[in-house]
Amino acid sequence: MAPIIQSTQQWVEKYRPKQVKDVAHQEEVVRVLTNTLETGSCPHMLFYGPPGTGKTTTALAIAHQLFGPELYKSRVLELNASDDRGINVVRTKIKDFAAVAVGTNQRKNGYPCPPYKIIVLDEADSMTEDAQACFRECAEAYNGNLL
Ligand SMILES: Nc1ncnc2c1ncn2[C@@H]1O[C@H](COP(=O)(O)OP(=O)(O)OP(=O)(O)O)[C@@H](O)[C@H]1O
Ligand SMILES: [Mg+2]
């Protein structure tokens, strides 16, 4: 009998597309984001749809493709469902992240590295109302740094 191979990686992570072009059945989204990769210009985005249709996958893929592994940590803040979604998180994590400006546009190691940061608010519908209002203020105040 073949030995059972223990895998520490879930299939949902193992087979998650790493590139925007590999996201299936979302032609419009892929087209817009391919343009973002070419021009560096990225609109504010709200992904909605049924579970398991690629919202998280697409957000993470575009963020990785824009900045690459070296800059990813300093340019992308990921907040997911396991993070607290109250107003304190916006006041601390998000504000601190948004307040620090980034340098000018400079392609690095083949990645576009445009001069802004990205916050991925996964499961954003679970943010409290206070937190949403605070986030809006923050996004307006740091408009130049943030996406
Ligand atoms: N459009 C897609 N193209 C290719 N693979 C996909 C697509 N949508 C989902 N998948 C696969 O399903 C898994 C789950 O997708 P993902 O986490 O992006 O869904 P989601 O829309 O964020 O769902 P939820 O609303 O539950 O957060 C991914 O790891 C990927 O393997
Ligand atoms: Mg998701």
Image: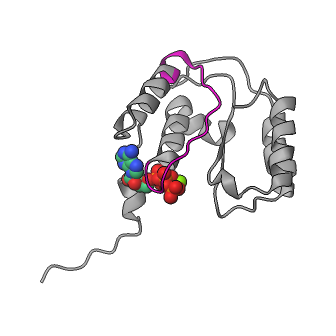
The stretch in magenta equals 36-53
Left or right side of 136 for 147: left
Residue 14 visible in the current orientation: yes
Whether 64 is drawn above or below 80: the answer is above
Can see residue 110? Answer: no
- Percent across and percent down for residue 55 are 50, 46
Q: Quadrant of residue 100?
A: top right
Q: Residue 29 location in percent, x, y? A: 46, 32
- The residue under the point 55% across, 23% down is 108
Using the image as rendered, state which of residue 96 and residue 1 is in the foreground.
96
Q: Is residue 38 magenta?
A: yes
Q: How is the image coloured?
A: one colour
**93, above or below 34, in the image:** below
Which residue corresponds to the image point at 49% horizontal and 23% vertical from the top-left?
37
Residue 31 x, y percent position in the rendering: 42, 25
Q: Quadrant of residue 105?
A: top right
Report the number of discs.
Answer: 0
The answer to whether residue 128 is left or right of residue 7 is right
Q: Which secondary structure dominates the residues rendered in magenta? A: loop
Quarter placement of the C terminus: top right
Q: Residue at x 51, y 35 (%)?
A: 62
Instruction: Confirm whether the magenta stretch covers residue 45.
Output: yes
Residue 134 position, x and y percent, is: 86, 45
Q: Hey, which quadrant is residue 5 in on the image?
A: bottom left
Taking the view exactly as shown, the residue that stands out farthest to the left is 1
- Pick whichever, 135 or 99, lies toward us: 135
Q: Quadrant of the N terminus?
A: bottom left
Question: In the rendered view, does 3 fall on the left or right side of 23?
Answer: left
